[in-house]
Amino acid sequence: MADRYKRWLIQLCLAALMAGGWPPAAQAEDTLIWLLRDLPPLTILEGPSKGQGALDQLLPILIEHLPQYRHQVLHVNRARGMQMLREPTFTCDPSLLWTPERAQYMVFSRQAFVVVSNGITIRRSQQEAMATFIVDGQFDLQAFLDAHTARVGAIAERSYGPVIDERLRHADAQTLAFHYGNDALGSLLQMQRLGRLEAVLGYWPEIRYHALRQGIAADDLNFYPIKGNAPYQRTHIGCSDTPMGREAIERIDQVLHDIPLKQVQQSYAAWLDPVMRKQYLRDNPSFFQEVPPP
């Protein structure tokens, strides 16, 4: 009788588990989807330098220190990545600028990286025509947009930092050329070479990388910082603002606090031109001073 009762009790417990699901400790790990876009020299998805970007080195470290998740890497363009981050999915991007708009649907980590700020590139053959917008080695983007005489190329859904974003937000649509494709920057550089636009926004190492892939010599291009813009930009890891995303950011913040990032910073510096590299490494200690969270 006792044995029959024990068997009945075991069957009852198994039935309850099957109906209600296994307890959380027995469930498979949640899958964290990392969204990567082609952003040399941070992430390099194709070509002979594939996987050799600075964040290409950081991501495996993050994955190793987050064993409670399964990890999936997904290659997307900027527009698709932002669309996925707006959705209630468990997705994260390791290389984002904080903006008030993004903070409405995303949660951000502490500082993950520091990069030389976005600027503008013009063709050397256009130097004389653009001279009126270049003051003390900086490009007056506002004056350029107000002139309504030329167009600037930009990647759709990308943030270029608060100063540039504000200029673009209020610019006449006729002066802007946004590109949504997977090879958006390469396409914009080709449009510039064909005279369909006069200037292209982006990071200088990224522009040089894509220019060479497009058969455009770096010496044919001139890069200028934007007037009024900070020389460096602090990037963050951003996740969809969901319970799992918020929990992941807490864990990611701890990893970023614990791991040394000197090697990652040195890897990035190696991609800069000699003058920019020297200044970046000289300013590097200040990057790690405590700054208020976004």
Image (cartoon, grey):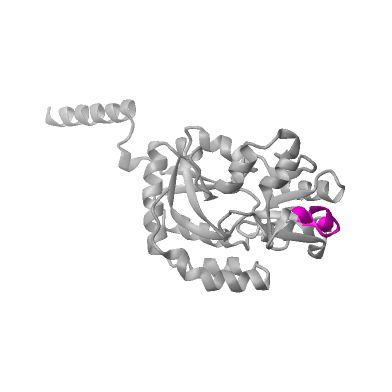
Instruction: Report the side of 73 relative to 151 (left or right).
Output: left
Answer yes or no: is residue 182 visible.
no
Quarter occupied by residue 21: top left
Quarter occupied by residue 291: bottom left
Instruction: Report the side of 111 relative to 184 (left or right).
Output: left
Q: Position of residue 117 (x, y in %)?
A: 60, 57
Q: Position of residue 25 (x, y in %)?
A: 31, 43
Q: Nearer the viewer, residue 202 or 141?
A: 141
Residue plotted at (46% across, 70% down): 285
Q: Nearer the viewer, residue 134 or 260?
A: 134
**Taking 185 as reference, is 212 above or below it?**
below
**Taking 88 as reference, is 60 above or below it?**
below
Residue 255 covered by magenta stretch:
no
Instruction: Report the side of 122 relative to 275 (left or right).
Output: right
Helix, strand or loop for the magenta stretch, by majority: helix
- Which contiguous range is marked in magenta? 122-132
Q: Position of residue 4 (x, y in %)?
A: 17, 28
* Position of the N terminus by quadrant: top left
Q: Nearer the viewer, residue 261 or 130?
A: 130
Residue 125 covered by magenta stretch:
yes
Residue plotted at (79% across, 43% down): 150
Instruction: Report the side of 174 relative to 34 (left or right).
Output: right
Answer yes or no: is residue 229 visible.
yes
Residue plotted at (53% across, 67% down): 265
